[in-house]
């Protein structure tokens, strides 16, 4: 079954533990016309969100490089 929903109308799930990054990515996407965004700052909540309400999901995956070791 083909999904005829345009890419601009599909939900976009943004996951990052830094709220500033979530806000920045969401703002960029909204400016580009992609207004159906869902932000999550705890990766453990991703599966629950997918199971509950998301179909035709697009992913933004941001991974900290091993070389920086995500040190704070």
Image (spheres, helix red, strand yellow):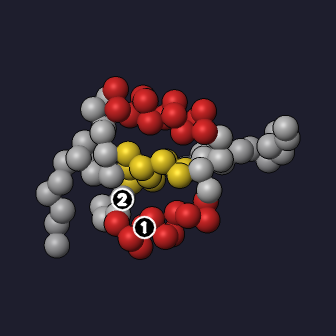
Quarter-of-image position of residue 26: top left
Residue 19 is situated, as x and y percent measured from the top left of the image, at 60, 39
Residue behind mark 2:
57
Q: Is residue 58 left or right of residue 9?
A: right
- Which label is found at residue 67? none
Residue 57 is situated, as x and y percent measured from the top left of the image, at 36, 59
Residue 17 is situated, as x and y percent measured from the top left of the image, at 65, 47
Q: Is residue 43 above or below residue 69?
A: below
Q: Which residue appears at 80% of the width and 43% of the height?
A: 70
Residue behind mark 1:
50
The quadrant of the image that shows the C terminus is top right
Element carrying mark 2: loop
Task: Check whether the beta carbons of the residues at disc 2 and disc 1 lie within 8 A of each other.
Answer: yes
Quarter-of-image position of residue 29: top left
Q: Which residue appears at 33% of the width and 52% of the height?
A: 11
Element carrying mark 1: helix
Asked whether the viewer can see residue 67, the reply is no
The quadrant of the image that shows the N terminus is bottom left
Q: Which residue appears at 51% of the width and 34% of the height?
A: 23
């Amino acid at each position: 079954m083909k999904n005829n929903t345009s890419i601009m109308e599909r939900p976009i799930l943004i996951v990052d533990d830094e709220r500033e990054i979530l806000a920045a990515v969401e703002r960029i996407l909204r400016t580009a016309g992609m207004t159906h965004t869902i932000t999550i700052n705890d990766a453990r909540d991703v599966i629950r969100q997918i199971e509950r309400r998301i179909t035709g999901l697009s992913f933004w995956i941001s991974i900290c490089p091993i070389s920086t070791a995500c040190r704070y």
